[in-house]
Amino acid sequence: MVPLVRPGSRGGPPNNWLSAFGGSGWEWDESTGQYYFHSYLKEQPDLNWRNPQVQKEMHDTMRFWLDKGVDGFRVDVMWHMIKDKRLRNNPPNPAFTKGMSPYMRFLPTYSVDQPEVHDIVAGMRKVTNEYQERVLIGEIYLPVKSLVTYYGDNNEEAHLPFNFQLITLPWDAREIAAAIDQYEGALPEGAWPNWVLGNHDKHRIATRVGAKQAKIAAMLLLTLRGTPTMYYGDELGMKNVFIPRKKIQDPHEKNIPGLGLGRDPERTPMQWNAEDHAGFTNGTPWLPLGRNYQKVNVSVQLEDEDSMLRFYKRLIKLRNTTPALNAGNFRPLEAEGNILAYIRRQGKQKWLVALNLGSRRQSLEINDIEVNGKVALGTHPDKEGAEVSNKITLRGNEGILVNCQDH
């Protein structure tokens, strides 16, 4: 492979491109007399995707794994793959303030999201399309307008450019409703949406929104139009774990300490049972476990009908067996305050989703569509089976799925 390099004297880096993990992104290599660029760790050189040899080798590497039967690829930091041809300096960030990551000192104008990246992604998609039922996913943290361009003009790029809005937005019903509308409206024709609730880089959902709202978040993720993406342990309600300084593993925190940039708290071992190390290993895990692992684990929750895990299983089963929920149309409903509501519909199937993202009781009156039906699934089991009409009252932290099937 050919790394991205630039000649220069050993006296300093050739421009102000920074590493996301601290310091300059340029590293001097004594053996070649050149700098090479790394967006992250110095052990992770960025490749020069402008070199045809790099593209060929990467395509051959993809085929190697596709031949072995992998379902596809999630491409890390897809929008970073190619850089400005002239390696121009990034401009200062006028919004940078003390307490931000040092990486934010400059706007990555010339080091990310370059126009040529779309040709690179299209080339990877072309290789993926040589095989049946494979998927190309892109990890991309960009505003929606830029994010959706990674589908390609004719859906010839990534199948699923990851949509991280549920991770990054405030947990506010009106903001999330507006974001859903904006995203749905920005999707290219024929593009399939996706939603991500948690990942290895951001605080766990139960930590971000609280344990009582975690079921609401699950119901939102699994009833929106598009492919849902979950993070291990969220189906248990696992929370961030405090990591003592001596046990920190994340190089981000080690290189830039004190700003809360470390990701170890959301990367602790999966909690399988109440045995030593939560059944994850017979050895010593690389990160400590949460103190509640003897109660918050798979084994315990499988036996508890009201547990988070059993709730997720019911949600997933309902989604998988209900065309309106897994592939149907999406129609937002007007709501106020903390209520988020929408209709999923396919053929004669019609389902109402109503979610209270707040902690206080609130009512919703639907005026422009008939929604009479029964609650098929709720965060509060005592509501299930109840008849629902166009005026709905939800308790704090309550969500319902209503079967309003046309007859």
Image (spheres, helix red, strand yellow):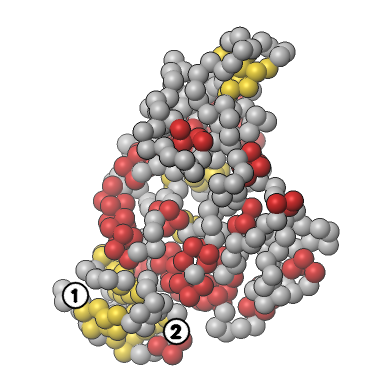
Residue at 66% x, 10% y: name it: 33
**Side of 285 where 69 appears, left or right:** left
The amino acid pointed to by label 2 is His
Image quadrant where residue 278 sits = bottom right
**Side of 331 where 247 appears, left or right:** right
**Residue 275 x/y as whole percent:** 78, 72
- 383 vs 205, nearest the viewer: 205
Residue at 46% x, 86% y: name it: 381
Q: Residues within 10 Å of mark 1 (few under 14, many from 20)?
A: few
Q: Which residue is mark 2?
A: 380
User: Can you say which quadrant of the picture contains the N terminus?
Assistant: top right
- 1 vs 396, nearest the viewer: 396
Q: Is residue 85 visible?
A: no
**Residue 313 x/y as whole percent:** 54, 73
Vertical placement of residue 250 versus 130, above or below: below
Reading the chain from its start, which is encountered first: label 2 or label 1?
A: 1
Vertical placement of residue 242 versus 18, above or below: below
Vertical placement of residue 266 versus 133, above or below: below
Residue at 49% x, 43% y: name it: 99
Q: Nearer the viewer, mark 2 or mark 1?
A: 2
**Side of 177 where 207 appears, left or right:** right
